Image: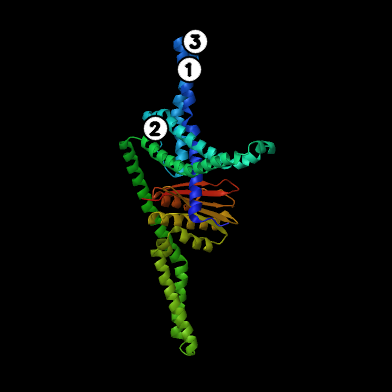
């Protein structure tokens, strides 16, 4: 069954929103029972109703403080993995922002999340009211002849709730993606300082990676294909001069071969000047990757979900990552197949390359992975590698869609 692309994207977005809300509700409401517990103990301490209350009171207080810091990392993972929104990694020195978010803002968001989830569940149950009715005994249906009208009203209300719930869920997700970064942010001066340092380091690494890549290509061409083509062109040129008594048809073949050898040398020189195909610029990453997968020496299963194009420089880096990863798999992994998944999550372009090879990939044993990490870092991206001995190997690259 072929699902239209627009409907598939809507269903994917709805699933993401529901997972985001469902995972956020317990995190946002985690501090509420602690506050209630602490309030009860304080009331018992003041009134003298319990002699154990002053002894137990430090427990919820400590748990509230721990939750105020520990829940930040859970929210960072949730926003990053489901929405592609990167929350800053906060220090203990800015505890006021974290405690304010988890103690004041989070319970309000958690209540809204519970309401949206309740609307979804109630709408689903109401829309299927006739199923519940027909599960009742037949005698009950005979004794209540007007139940169909009431059930129809309930089903209509359920359908209306299901129609409204996705919009409310999306609005709540957008609200959280604005509120959380606005509250959980570091001081502006510290943020700018780290940003300048990161940009300086990544740009320097980009220059070094580009220079090293250029030298590698020049060395490979000079020592390999270019030398063989030059030798071939030279031999064909000598043949044109030395074999003057050949028939015209044979001389024409030699002339054509000589011309094609020289054109091949020119094409190799053009390849050095352009490191990605023209289709990447014209039609984007999702149109360029199938050709890359088709040319790989092993079966490649490609999945690309890119409703919008990223910046040209980011697409070039993503194409280079997939190309280099497939080359490394064919050369070192001893794999029988590879999986390439490229998707866009909010403002993040994620590239996942996996294989069923022997694993054990280690950047300390060669410059391939180091070069990839530098290329990814040149656009402020991140690279994570999981390659246990025996496999499988999974490389995950996340790139910002806009530079």
Nearer to us of marks 2 and 3 is: 3
Badge 3 is on which residue?
A: 49
Furthest residue in direction left, as rendered: 189
The part of the image, by quadrant, that contains residue 128 is top right
Marks 1/2 in contact by CB < 8 Å: the verdict is no
Sequence-first disc among 2 and 3: 3
**Quadrant into which the N terminus falls:** bottom right
Sequence-first disc among 3 and 1: 1
Badge 1 is on which residue?
A: 40
Badge 2 is on which residue?
A: 91
CA–CA distance in space, label 3 to label 1: 11 Å
How packed mark 1 is, by other alpha carbons closer than 10 Å (few <14, some 14-19, many 20 or more), is some
Q: Is residue 264 left or right of residue 122?
A: left
Q: State whether residue 276 appears in this view.
A: no
- Between 321 and 368, the residue placed more toward the observer is 321
Q: What residue is shown at x 46% (from left), y 23% (from top)?
A: 35
Task: Measuring from the top left, give residue 87's x and y in whole percent.
Answer: 41, 39
Sequence-first disc among 1 and 2: 1
């Amino acid at each position: 069954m072929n699902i239209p692309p627009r409907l598939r994207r809507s269903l994917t977005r709805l699933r993401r929103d529901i997972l985001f809300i469902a995972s956020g509700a317990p995190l946002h409401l985690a501090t509420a029972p602690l506050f209630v517990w602490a309030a009860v103990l304080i009331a018992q301490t003041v009134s003298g109703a319990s002699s154990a209350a002053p002894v137990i009171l430090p427990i919820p207080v400590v748990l509230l403080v721990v939750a105020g810091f520990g829940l930040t990392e859970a929210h960072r993972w949730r926003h990053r993995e489901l929405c592609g929104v990167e929350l800053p990694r906060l220090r203990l020195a800015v505890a006021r922002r974290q405690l304010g978010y988890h103690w004041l803002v989070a319970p309000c968001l958690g209540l809204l999340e519970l309401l949206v989830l309740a609307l979804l569940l109630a709408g689903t149950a109401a829309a299927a009211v006739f199923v519940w009715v027909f599960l009742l005994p037949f005698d009950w249906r005979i004794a209540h002849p007007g139940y169909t009208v009431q059930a129809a009203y309930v089903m209509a209300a359920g359908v209306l709730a299901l129609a409204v719930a996705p919009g409310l869920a999306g609005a709540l997700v957008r609200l959280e993606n604005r509120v959380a970064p606005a509250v959980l942010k570091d001081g502006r001066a510290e943020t700018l300082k780290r940003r300048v340092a990161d940009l300086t380091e990544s740009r320097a690494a980009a220059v070094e990676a580009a220079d090293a890549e250029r030298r590698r290509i020049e060395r490979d061409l000079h020592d390999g294909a270019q030398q063989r083509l030059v030798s071939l062109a030279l031999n064909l040129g000598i043949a044109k001069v030395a074999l003057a008594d050949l028939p015209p048809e044979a001389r024409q073949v030699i002339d054509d071969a000589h011309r094609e050898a020289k054109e091949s040398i020119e094409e190799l020189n053009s390849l050095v000047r352009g490191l990605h195909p023209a289709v990447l610029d014209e039609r984007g990453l999702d149109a360029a990757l199938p050709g890359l997968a088709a040319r790989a020496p092993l079966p490649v299963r490609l999945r690309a979900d890119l409703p919008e194009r990223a910046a040209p420089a980011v697409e070039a880096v993503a194409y280079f990552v997939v190309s280099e990863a497939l080359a490394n798999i064919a050369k070192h992994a001893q794999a029988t197949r590879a999986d390439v998944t490229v998707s866009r999550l909010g403002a993040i372009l994620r590239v996942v390359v996996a294989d069923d090879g022997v694993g054990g990939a280690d950047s300390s044993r060669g410059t391939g992975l180091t070069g990839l990490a530098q290329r990814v870092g040149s656009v402020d991206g991140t690279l994570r590698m999981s390659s246990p001995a025996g496999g499988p190997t999974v490389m995950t690259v996340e790139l910002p869609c806009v530079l």
